[in-house]
Image (cartoon, grey):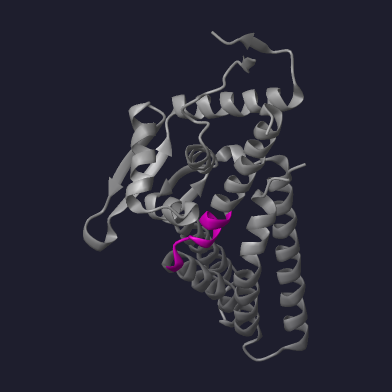
């Protein structure tokens, strides 16, 4: 094998190993904190079913969402590895940004629909569905966000 | 034969390069995660990590106690610079870039 072929093989191996460890870091998030975050996110949406004043309702939603965010951050920090900031490319932010916009838009649309249909405990059901969808898609979104395309 | 500037013989062996690649993509990684991903034994990985620590390329931190004890491995700034230099050297070899110097 020539030096150039060897260098190409090593560069391919570097990319492959970096993708492997990023995937392992995504899978290796702290399950306890992730579960706590999911519960807080569910509580935030479910709190819309509770009859509260507008201000108190807003505090409940924002507060529970803030708790969820802290829990999800801790799940990453207490995981088995933390992805280095050098992996946060424009593509990473684009994928994460699009995922956030889609999630927020979907949640907003679903909340409006539930309020129009007046389903009993509709927000609680919606929160459960949202958390389930998030759990099912988060790994794939993270993988798409952090994976480097190799030529 | 010319060696591109930044080529690092310490990093180049496949197992060590794999380990450095993983550490470069992370702020830190658990020893267990590295061991499982690289499919190495504890002692084999320990040896590779020690070589990097001795060279000043990596550092080890131990947290917790008992069953919660975690060993975290991370690259030092010198290790990260050496890895980046080595990748650039490999890239230069592939591109056959003129940024080469004669081997001593």
Please give the name of the residue rendered at 61% of the width and 63% of the height, measured from the top-left corner: A139
**Residue at the outermost bottom position:** A120
Front-most of residues B56 and A29: B56
A50 part of magenta stretch: no
Residue A104 vertical position relative to residue A128 in the rendered view, above or below: above
Residue B12 vertical position relative to residue B97 in the rendered view, above or below: below
Image quarter in which the C terminus of chain A is found: top right
* x and y percentages locating residue B103 in the rendered image: 58, 11
* x and y percentages locating residue B28 in the rendered image: 44, 43
Please give the count of numbered marks on the rendered protein: 0
Please give the name of the residue rendered at 69% of the width and 45% of the height, measured from the top-left corner: A148
Please give the name of the residue rendered at 58% of the width and 56% of the height, measured from the top-left corner: A23
The part of the image, by quadrant, that contains residue A104 is bottom right
Residue A57 vertical position relative to residue B31 in the rendered view, above or below: below
A27 part of magenta stretch: yes
* x and y percentages locating residue A60 in the rendered image: 52, 69
Q: Main secondary structure of the magenta part?
A: helix
Image quarter in which the N terminus of chain A is found: top right
Left or right: B57 as drawn, with respect to B21: left
**Residue at the outermost left position:** B66
| Span shown in magenta | A23-31
Please give the name of the residue rendered at 66% of the width and 12% of the height, measured from the top-left corner: B100
* x and y percentages locating residue A127 in the rendered image: 61, 77
Left or right: B1 as drawn, with respect to A109: left
**Residue at the outermost front position:** A1
Front-most of residues A7 and A111: A7
């Amino acid at each position: 094998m020539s030096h150039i072929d060897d260098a190409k093989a090593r560069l391919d191996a570097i990319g492959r190993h970096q993708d492997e460890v990023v995937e392992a870091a995504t899978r290796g998030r702290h399950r306890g904190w992730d579960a706590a975050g999911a519960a807080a996110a569910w509580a935030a949406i479910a709190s819309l079913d509770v009859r509260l004043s507008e201000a108190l309702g807003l505090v409940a939603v924002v507060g529970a969402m803030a708790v969820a965010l802290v829990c999800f951050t801790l799940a990453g920090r207490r995981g088995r590895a933390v992805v280095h900031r050098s992996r946060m490319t424009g593509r990473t932010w684009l994928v994460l940004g699009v995922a956030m916009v889609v999630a927020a838009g979907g949640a907003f649309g679903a909340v409006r629909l539930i309020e129009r249909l007046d389903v009993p405990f509709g927000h609680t059901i919606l929160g459960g569905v949202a958390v389930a969808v998030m759990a099912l898609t988060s790994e794939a979104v993270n993988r798409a966000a952090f994976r480097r395309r190799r030529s | 034969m010319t060696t591109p500037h930044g080529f690092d013989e310490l990093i180049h062996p496949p197992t060590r390069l794999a380990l450095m690649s993983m550490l470069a993509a992370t702020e830190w990684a658990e020893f267990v995660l590295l061991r499982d991903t690289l499919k190495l034994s504890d002692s084999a990985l320990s040896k590779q990590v020690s070589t990097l620590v001795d060279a000043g390329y990596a550092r080890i931190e131990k947290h917790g106690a008992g069953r919660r004890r975690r060993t975290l491995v991370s690259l030092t700034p010198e290790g990260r610079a050496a890895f980046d230099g080595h990748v650039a050297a490999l890239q230069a070899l592939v591109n056959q870039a003129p940024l080469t110097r004669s081997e001593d």
